[in-house]
Image (tube, rainbow, N blue to C red):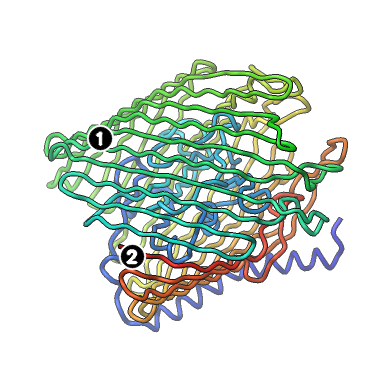
Amino acid sequence: MQPENDRNEVALSIRLAACLTGSALLAISSAARAQSTMLPAAIALDPVIVTANRTSTPARAVGSAVTVIDRAELERRQVRFVADALRTVPGVGLSRTGGAGGLTQVRLRGAEGNQTLVLIDGIEVNDPASGGEYDFANLLADDVERIEVLRGPQSALFGSDAIGGVINIVTRKGEGKTSASARMEGGSLGTASGLVSIGGAAGNADFFGSLGGYRTDGESSASQWRGNPERDGYDNVTGFAKFGFDATEDLRFDMVGRVTDYRADADGFADGLPADADAATRGRQMYGRVQARLDTLDGRWQHVAGISRSHSTLRYLTNGVRTDAYVGDRTKVDYQSNVFITQEAARLDHTFTVLAEHEEESADVDGAYSSFDRSTGQTGLVGQYQLGIADALFLTGAVRHDMNDRFADATTWRGTAAYDLSRTGTKLRGSYGTGIKNPSLFELFGYDGTYRGNPGLKPERAKGWDIGVDQWIVRDALSVEATYFDQRITDLIQGAGTTSINLDGTSSIHGIELGATAYLMDGLTVRAAYTFLDGEDADGITLARRPENVASLDIGYSFLDGAAALNLGIVYTGGQQDIAFDAFYNQSRVELDSYTLVNLAGSYRFNDHAEAFARVENLFDERYEDVYGYGGMGRLAVAGVKLSF
C-alpha cells in the first residue's frame, strides 16, 4: 500500500496532467489570436485519409476518430522507433518491458495489444505465433512516410484483431529526380544508428530503397534501482525496398518488401521479479506485397488486387543455448472494387466498395519439452456504401461476413457520419461499430505441456461508439478536437491456471480524447493531446496497464529561413495498475507511479547537402516502469550528421 505522501504526489500529478492540455490550449489560443498571417497553402489543404474507408477520403468527410503523423513531424522530432511517435496520439497506450528491444505493446482505447490491427503498406503484420499481437519493439521509423491511427472497432472493414482500432503505416515512395542520403549518429549508452537510402522517379516507374541499423548497449531490462546493474543491449538491421510501375495510364503495379533482423538481450526472474540473467531473443521479420490497380470508365470504376505475405521467427536463448523457437506465417489474397458516382444536379456523391479476401495463417512452435504446428484459414466478404450530400453531410455504412474454418461465421458492421460546417470551420462526427478477435493458435492448442489449449474458445466480441467535434478557429491557425468514446467487450479471453477461458460478463471502457494543433508565428507549431480512460472488467476491477491520464505537448520551431529547427516534446503518463507475481506465481495488484518524459531535439542545415543534428531523450533521466519490474530507458544523448546527394 502506498504511503499517504506518495498518494498525494500521484493525485497532484494527475491534476497537473489534466491541466497540461488545458493550459496548452489557452496559451495556444492566445498566441494564435495574436498572429495575423494565414496558413501556408500546403498546410491548409484538407488531408486525405486512406484507412478510415479503405479509399482515399478527405479528412472532413471521415466520421471516425483518426490521427495522422507525417514524415516531417517524425524528422523534426528525430523519432527512431514508430512506438515512440505513437505516444503522443490521443487514445494510445504503450507498455514496454525495459528499454530498446523490450516487448512493446500498443493499445488503442484500452483494448488489449492483440486487439489492435497493424498494417504496413497494407500488409497485416500481427504475428500468428505470438498471440496475434504485433511487437512494436523492432519497427524503425526511418522509411515511414505517414502513420494513420484509426480508433474504435473496425472489424467491418478489416476483420479480426481490429477491436481497438487500426494503425496503418505507409512507407516512402520514390519521387522526382533520383537522390540519395546517408545518416550517421552516435551517443551515450553505446548507442549508434545509421541509414542509407536512394529513391526517385523516371518515366513511368518510381523506386525507393533503404538500409538502416540501430544498436545500443542499453541499460538493464530489469529495473536498475531494484539491484540489476547488468546492461541489456539491442541490435537491429532493417532493409526496405518499394517499386511502382505505370504500365498504362489506367494500370499500375506496386511491389514492396521489408526485412528486419534483430537481437535483444533480456533478463530472467527471481522471486517473481525480473532479474539479471544471461538471456536473449533473436528474430527476423519479413513482409512483402505485390499489387495491381486498374482504373476503368475514366477512373469511376477501380479494381485493386494483391497478395501479401508476412513471416516472423523468434528464438529465445538462455546461457547461449536456444530454448524455444516460434515461427509465424500469414498469406493473404485480396480483391477490392470501388465505384464512384457523382450526381452533380442533386449534389450527391456515391462510393460503392466490395472486398473479398482469403488468408491462411500458421504457427510453428518448438519448445524445450513439446511443440506444435497448427494453421487456420478465413475468408471475408465486405460491402460498403459512402454517401456525400451537398459536400457537407457524409454517411458511411459497412458490413462484413467472415467464414473461419475453426469458428462459427461472424458478421460485423459499422456506420459513421460527419457533418462539415465550412462557414464556421466545424466538423461534427460520430461512429458506431462492432469488432471481433479470434482466439490465437496458442490459446487454442496450448504449448510446452504446461499450458493446455482450449479448442472450445469463442472469439472475443466488441461494440463501441464515439461522438466528437473538430474545430478550426482563429483564421485557420488553431484546430481543436474532442471525442467521447464508449466500448464494451464480451467473451474476453484470459488465462486461468494452465489454460485459457472466455470470461463471463462484459468489460467496459470509456473515456475522453482531446487534441489541439496551432500554427503560430512563422515556423512555430504546437501540438497538445490528452486522454482520460476508465476501464473495468466484468467484476468492476480496473484493467491493468491502462493509465487513467495521458497527456503530451510538442513544440516545434524552425528559423533562419528553415535552416535551423528545435523541438521540445513532453509526455506525461499517469499512475496505473499492474499485476505482480510472487515466487509461487500468485497474483497481486501493484501501482505503477506516474512519470513525465522530456525529449529535446535540434538540427542545422548547412546547405542542400549537409545537416547536423542532436537530441536528448528522457532529458531529466526520469525513473519509470511501464511494466512492473522493468525499467524504462534512462537519459540518452545522441549527435550526428546527414548527407544528401
Q: Measuring 74% from the left and 21% from the top, which residue is drawn there?
A: 369
- Image location (x, y in percent) of residue 379: 42, 21
Amino acid on which disc 2 is placed = Gly
Label 1 belongs to which residue?
338
| Quarter of the image with the N terminus in it | bottom right
Amino acid on which disc 1 is placed = Asn
Residue 249: mark: none
| Quarter of the image with the C terminus in it | bottom left
- Whether residue 181 appears in this view of the structure is yes
- Image location (x, y in percent) of residue 641: 44, 67
Q: Measuring 43% from the left and 34% from the top, which residue is drawn there?
A: 158
Q: Measuring 47% from the left and 70% from the top, which residue is drawn there?
A: 613
Q: Please name whichever residue, 398 or 633, is drawn nearer the observer in this view of the structure.
A: 633
Which-is-in-front pick, marks 2 and 1? 1
Q: Check the image and name the residue furthest to the front.
A: 320
- With 615 as the anchor, is 319 left or right in this view? right
- Image location (x, y in percent) of residue 265: 67, 46
- With 330 as the anchor, is 596 left or right in this view? right
Report the number of discs: 2
- Tell me the element at label 2: loop
Q: Are marks 2 and 1 in contact (CB under 8 Å)?
A: no
Q: Check the image and name the residue furthest to the bottom.
A: 34
Give the CA distance from mark 2 to mark 1: 30 Å
Q: Please name whichever residue, 17 or 76, is drawn nearer the observer in this view of the structure.
A: 76
Q: Residues within 10 Å of mark 2 (few under 14, many from 20)?
A: some
Label 2 belongs to which residue?
425
Q: Please name whichever residue, 366 or 88, is drawn nearer the observer in this view of the structure.
A: 366
Q: Residues within 10 Å of mark 1 (few under 14, many from 20)?
A: many
Query: Of the residues under marks 2 and 1, which one precedes in the sequence?
Result: 1
